[in-house]
Image: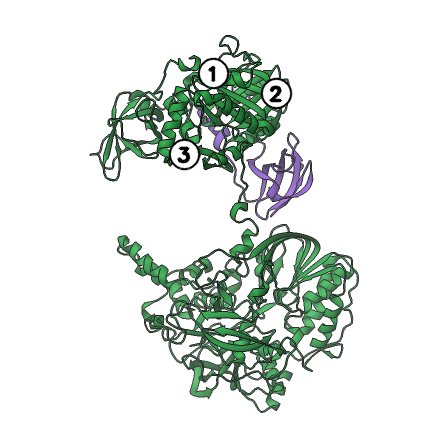
Chain colours: A green, B purple
Amino acid sequence: MTKNLRVKSSKLVDETYRISFKFNGTTYYGFKGDTLASALLANNIHLVGRSFKYHRPRGIMTAGSEEPNAIVQLHNGTSRTEPNVRATEIEIYEGLVASSQNCWPSVKFDIGGINNFLSPLLPAGFYYKTFMWPASFWEKYEYFIRKSAGLGKSPDVPDPDIYEHKYIHCDVLVIGAGISGIMAAKTAAKNGFKTLLVEEKSYLGGSTIYQDSEFFKINNQNSASWLEKEINEVKKIENLEIKTRTSVAAFHGYNFLLARENLTDHLPLEQRENKTRQKLLKIRAKKVITATGSIERPLIFDNNDRPGILLSSAIKKYADLFGVACGEKNVLFTNNDSAYETAISLIQKGIKVQAIIDNREEIDSKLIKETEKNNIKIYKGYTIVDTFGYKRINSVSIMKLSKDGQKVIGSKENISCDSLGISGGWTPAVHLFTQSGGKLKFRDDDQVFIPNTYPSNQISIGSCNGDFTLDEILINTPKLLKEFLNITKTEYENIEIFSAFNKSKRNIWLLPSNKIVGKTKSFVDFQNDATAKDIKLALREGFRSIEHVKRYTTTGMGTDQGKLGNMHALGIISETASSKLGELGTTTFRPPYTPLTFGTIVGRNVGKYFDITRKTPIHEWHVENKAEFENVGQWKRAWYYPKNGENMHQAVQRESKAARDSAGILDASTLGKIDIQGTDASEFLNRVYTNAWSKLEIGKCRYGLMLNEDGMVYDDGVTTRLDENHYIMTTTTGGAATVLGKLEDYLQTEWPELDVYLTSVTDHYATISVCGPNSKKIIQKVIPEIDLSDKDFPHMSFRNSIIGKVKCRVMRISFTGEQSYEINIQANYAKSVWENCMEAGKEFNITPYGTETMHLLRAEKGFIIAGQDTDATMTPIDLQMDWIVSKKKFDFIGKRSLYRSDTIREDRKQLVGLITDNPEEILEEGAQIVADMNKTPIEMLGHVTSSYFSPNLKKSIALGVVKGGKNMMGQKLIIPMEKKQINVTVTDPVFLDKENKRLNA
Amino acid sequence: MFLINCPFCGEREQSEFKAGGEAHIVRPKQPTELSDDQWAEYLFMRKNIKGIQFERWNHIHGCRKWFNMVRDTSNDEIKAVYKMGEKPPIK
């Protein structure tokens, strides 16, 4: 196990810089530039995890973001822990701690491995089939399913890192810095386009940058050397920005893309403090060039998932780029020329290749000839039928394929190995293209989906567009770029290309075996343990749509979203169901392309920055006076002011009593305020409120109810006529923005002929409400200039006045039923005026009260709160507020709806008062109201909307909505609770001072 | 995310706008004259087309103006924007 499989120095790895890291508790060493995967492989470690369902041992399979198996937990138990990190992507740093996931007690001995032997009992759709009966057991099943499912562990302490969002605007965005991406970025930037090139890896050049052999040449240089020069030039171009470690997560319409830029994940933890970890880039590009490359396909055969089985391209990359051998006895298995590229790379580095098994018969290929020269045994027309070795592959069985490729013939032969590279050809990475709305077409020749129609100003180039070979890329890319960028020439005309790659491929989606399909474990989706057998079962059970098969078998789900095996699933479905692959379509690729951390998604919008907090200008006073606060939308409102250890109930009882007995003061600044001006202002109010406004005198206030066009109560508030053509409307706190929006909507779209202007002044004015029998005396002390006599300043009127040198508006209006004055003053002065009121009210025991007391006081008077006692199904008639609906007005918003067949029903839910038989019993808001407990099912008549203990009436009071409640006065109803039934009597909703005597007391 | 050409402000990102449903539904001048069915037609019935759709949009985090848009709902292509009260530039 402690072998060193580092064979040769490489470009990416700095062998003078040794790094120690921990994996599953053991310390290992790697070099700067290694990924966790390459460092583990250099230490001869393949086994890194267990599979999701059967808990089979799994190893590193790829060398990129498509990795299904080698996913690890970083820094488990710390604030920086992160699950499901691909070992193939994370760059090692000093102090990195990684551990295997989905195994217990350890990756080498995993109890869940028993599922592997139980697998005949765990077919596709197992959960759906098994846990449905008896239905009442679901809760018990769910507990165990949740426990055994899921891959890594999420952190349970706050994330210490900083994340940011950034907008980027560019002319051309190039996604992917492989050979075609580099060509595109250089061409675009040199032609004057402001260009951004993003690459998910830490280096540029894709797979060509390590294609260092005489079989792939550009202008007589090895393709790697040619590309290196190109990259050096590209780095010097001024209007070209390059971002590495940046992965595009989403490609939305109108060329809007989201990318994650990784800034610190490759640094030792102590170097990350105070640095931004990741940035979410919001990119708006005029043109997008997608050059995302392609992903090698695995091959589907029995036991194709053992540790030590990798994509052949991954073995090549580990050797070429990291100088690491994946094994000492390598076997390659292929249906195309790619495995020979790997073989030649391994030979160059002195890594032993035991044999190559090729599905194809005789092929005229330069690469094969070169391989044969090195005395490597090639089995042509053969397939692997089985593999052996539990925690690491140790041999393979091969058999000859029949001519039609449908079965195996002859006898089995065994080849020992410690690593197997598989290559099933290439799949263009079209994920981002299809996310953007692009439509694919199927190319029969080599069985690939490639881009067909583009929904926005974009193209795909290189192997993601189906150009796999060096000559195809270098010939087609310049042509595409010229047309796309509307230029006449690129630097890539008349280039000499030599590529030894032969494009022939023998595509067999599910390789035949000497066993029947039911006896094999041929994995199609490695992360979710979906096998060819599962897919065939789904088809036998009647599933046909690829989307249904995906969900039933879980093929293509999980953190890798099936980047490796999706095509094989499609292929097997098409073969089994005898439908054309091109007509099956693909499953939908959804963002993100690779997983994003929550931190990146939320950026800086965490903690108190998660949402805007709105505070009134008097907020500091409430804080100083120990108010408890309530969130009302974005507002912080004083809820109640506990004194001497009072709880909420005690504080509210005291505040309510004081407000009715002497004086209370409320900060009502959060109420929405809309300034309405214009010669048609009165007519406008006539149309938006249910009552009449034309005759309201200047200096008077009126309560108004606003409906939706469907007749349902939408908002309410008091509006004051300040002048002939000038009103100020108040709205509920929560309704301020939407009411303004609705009024603007009608003004702009239905009644553009009206001369009316609306301005929100909610934040400009603060509102201080003083109520109670002594309120007049207090206001008089604060504003000595004003004449407060009932004759001169009656209820529902308004006066301009002045406090010191500051103008203010005083309204005599009441939401409590007490005599009450509201001072509206420019926000900056509000706190000092509030303090003036407190000082003036001292002798009257003026008591600040919060929203809870306000709600209680208005409930005593039966005043509704729009949104609490109404819920978008209540008409004014339902609220017993017929008095506010004008019969004379020709029209207002919602009028016609008030006599639709549905709104005139007598048995609609109507607002009533509810009095409990036991005056101490307080109802729960939201509790159901019924009449007959013996009827089954019990008929729900309505529910409680507001409920309090009234200290002024010394009994429990409640408002509720009850079917046909208007005609049920005095009737007994029942509120059934979990452990008891509460008896109530239906009453009028006004509990206190029906005659409104207190308003003028 | 769309890039919307507000007729008053120019090109802005979709997040500045609010969609307001189907366009060119005129509020009846005399609602009281209408039967329940006719009123319900105005109140509730909206098209949900795959293809060319006429919509109202509001530049809510900008000039606050309402305007109309012609959008192909099958691919989100915005065919035209025009002011309230104007005739659609395309059918």
Amino acid type at image mark 2:
Gly
Toward the top, the furthest residue is A791
Residues packed near mark 1 inside 10 Å, few (<14), some (14 to 19) or many (20 plus): some
Figure quadrant of residue A104 = bottom left
In the structure shown, which secondary structural element does the residue marked by tag 2 occupy? loop
In the structure shown, which secondary structural element does the residue marked by tag 3 occupy? loop
Q: Is residue A75 visible?
A: yes
Q: Where residue A370 sits: x, y (%)?
A: 63, 87
The one of A773 and A996 positioned closer to us in this rendering: A773
Q: Give the quadrant of the C terminus of chain A.
A: top left
Residue A804 - label: 2
Residue that carries the numbered disc 1 in the rendered image: A886
Callouts 1 and 2 close, C-beta under 8 Å:
no
How far apart, in angstroms, are the residues tagged by discs 1 and 2? 42 Å
B42 lies left or right of A756: left
Specify whether disc 3 shares its chain with disc 1.
Answer: yes
How far apart, in angstroms, are the residues tagged by discs 3 and 1? 44 Å
Instruction: Please give the chain letter of the residue carrying mark 3.
Output: A
Callouts 2 and 3 close, C-beta under 8 Å:
no
A234 lies left or right of A759: right
Residue that carries the numbered disc 3 in the rendered image: A642
The one of A441 and A59 positioned closer to us in this rendering: A59
